[in-house]
Image: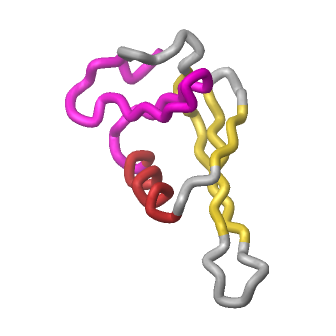
């Protein structure tokens, strides 16, 4: 991927937790764990809106990659196939 570091890896699992806010009526917060194809785990704390977009990308045919060096999530192959779907 252009601009991606050589540490960029495919995401093989995406898990999300919701932690309630201690204050009554608070929105709480989301925590997301990305597991890459080298079994490394990366934890993010996206906003609810960002999590909504992330879930939509994960359910689409897009390939998700994580660049830990630049802390960048890459959604590849949203339209067409630039990267092969199998490593």
Looking at this rendering, what residue extends furthest in the left direction? Answer: 80
Residue occupying the point 63% across, 56% down: 16
* Above or below, comparing residue 46 to residue 71 in the picture: below
- Image height check: is 18 above or below 86? below
Region rendered in magenta:
59-87
From the viewer's perspective, is residue 79 above or below residue 7?
below
Q: Main secondary structure of the magenta part?
A: loop
Residue at 75% in and 84% down: 23
User: Looking at this view, is 23 or 83 the one in front?
Assistant: 23
- The residue nearer to you, when weighing 12 against 40, is 40
Tell which of 45 and 81 is nearer to you. 45
Across and down, in percent, residue 37 comes to: 61, 24
Left or right? Give the position of 74 relative to 46.
left
Give the residue displayed 60% in from the left and 40% down from the top: 13
Q: Quadrant of the N terminus?
A: top left
Q: Quadrant of the rendered structure where residue 49 is?
A: bottom left
Magenta span contains residue 1: no
- For the image, the number of numbered tags is 0
Q: Residue at x 34, y 40 (%)?
A: 61
Residue 55 to residue 12: above or below = below
User: Given the current orientation, which residue lies at the most extreme top position?
Assistant: 6
Where residue 77 appears, x then y in whole percent?
Answer: 30, 29
């Amino acid at each position: 991927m252009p601009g991606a570091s050589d540490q960029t890896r495919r995401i093989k699992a995406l898990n999300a937790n919701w932690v309630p806010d201690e204050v009554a009526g608070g929105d709480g917060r989301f925590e997301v764990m990305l597991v890459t194809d080298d079994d490394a785990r990366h934890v993010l704390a996206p906003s609810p809106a960002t999590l909504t977009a992330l879930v939509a990308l994960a359910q689409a045919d897009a390939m998700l990659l994580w660049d830990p060096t630049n802390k960048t999530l890459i959604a590849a192959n949203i339209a067409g196939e630039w990267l092969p779907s199998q490593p």
